[in-house]
Image: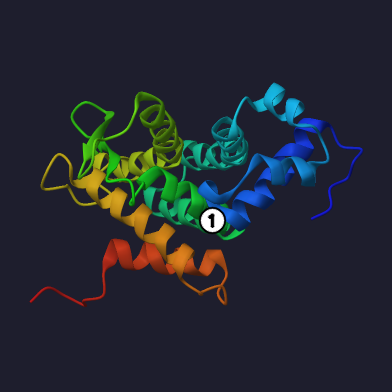
Amino acid sequence: MEIDKSLPKSERILLAAADVFSRKGYMQATLDEIIEIADTGKGTVYNYFKNKDNLFYTLVSKINEPFVTALLKIEANEESPFLKLELYLKEMLDFLRTNDTLWQVLFYEMMGANRGWYFIHDYATKENRLVVKWGAGPTQEEAERVSRYSELIGSSFRILENIMQEGVDTGVFKPSPENKGVHYAARHLYGGVAMAVFFGNDREESSATVAKIIADRFLFGFAKSAK
């Protein structure tokens, strides 16, 4: 990858980081390779970003910000919850298709499947709760790092949950049988769409077409009538 040397150093570093993290993942990415591609010194990278974690977080945060801004505009508009859901899904599909590999890296860092621990959003407290399946669990530094990634993903997820809750509150969507019903439905829809993009090969149809199909089937199902 060649980067325009006339760009500011911080921008060159972020462009190089996007390339390396997308090709190597988080664990195998090295600052040395990022520095070589950015054509800058190690001291410059540390001066701007301190360490690899902060560099990765800065990168994904910068990419995530306009995505969340677009989603918030959808949430705030005067359209029906039906259309808001469809518009949200289109925006999400466009974003994930553009940032496929990098966001897959982010998701895996957030989930930490090989570490034996992860964070899950606690519906009651509205905070992330640590779950340790095996091993000693994270250090405070590790926990803070992964929690930041969880919060970053949550910034777009919560908007989907709000749109679905608006539909229930206004009587457009049917009431949820449990207080957590909307949360669980939103979580599975969000995760399902993300995994379909990460591991699927369905780029033949436009994001708008796929969003319309998902919204229609999610809201109205396949059955013509209940038995």
The N terminus - image quarter: bottom right
Q: Nearer the viewer, residue 101 or 90?
A: 101
Q: Residue at x 36, y 55 (%)?
A: 191
Q: Position of residue 179 (x, y in %)?
A: 14, 39
Q: Nearer the viewer, residue 117 or 225?
A: 117
The C terminus - image quarter: bottom left
Evaluate whether residue 151 shows in this view. yes
Left or right: residue 4 compared with residue 121: right
Label 1 environment density (alpha carbons within 10 Å; few <14, some 14–19, many ≥20): many
In the picture as drawn, the residue positioned furthest to the left comes out as 227
Left or right: residue 165 compared with residue 84: left
In terms of secondary structure, where does tag 1 sit?
A: helix
Q: Position of residue 203 (x, y in %)?
A: 56, 73
Evaluate whether residue 99 shows in this view. no
Residue type at the position of mark 1: Leu
Q: Which residue is mark 1?
A: 96
Question: Compared to 161, does 144 lie above or below?
Answer: above
Left or right: residue 13 compared with residue 77: right
Q: Nearer the viewer, residue 90 or 99?
A: 99
Q: Position of residue 186 (x, y in %)?
A: 30, 49
Q: Position of residue 223 (x, y in %)?
A: 21, 76
Question: Compared to 189, does 68 lie above or below?
Answer: above
Question: Compared to 88, does 43 lie above or below?
Answer: above
Q: Residue at x 45, y 68 (%)?
A: 199
Q: Residue at x 26, y 69 (%)?
A: 221
Q: Residue at x 36, y 47 (%)?
A: 112
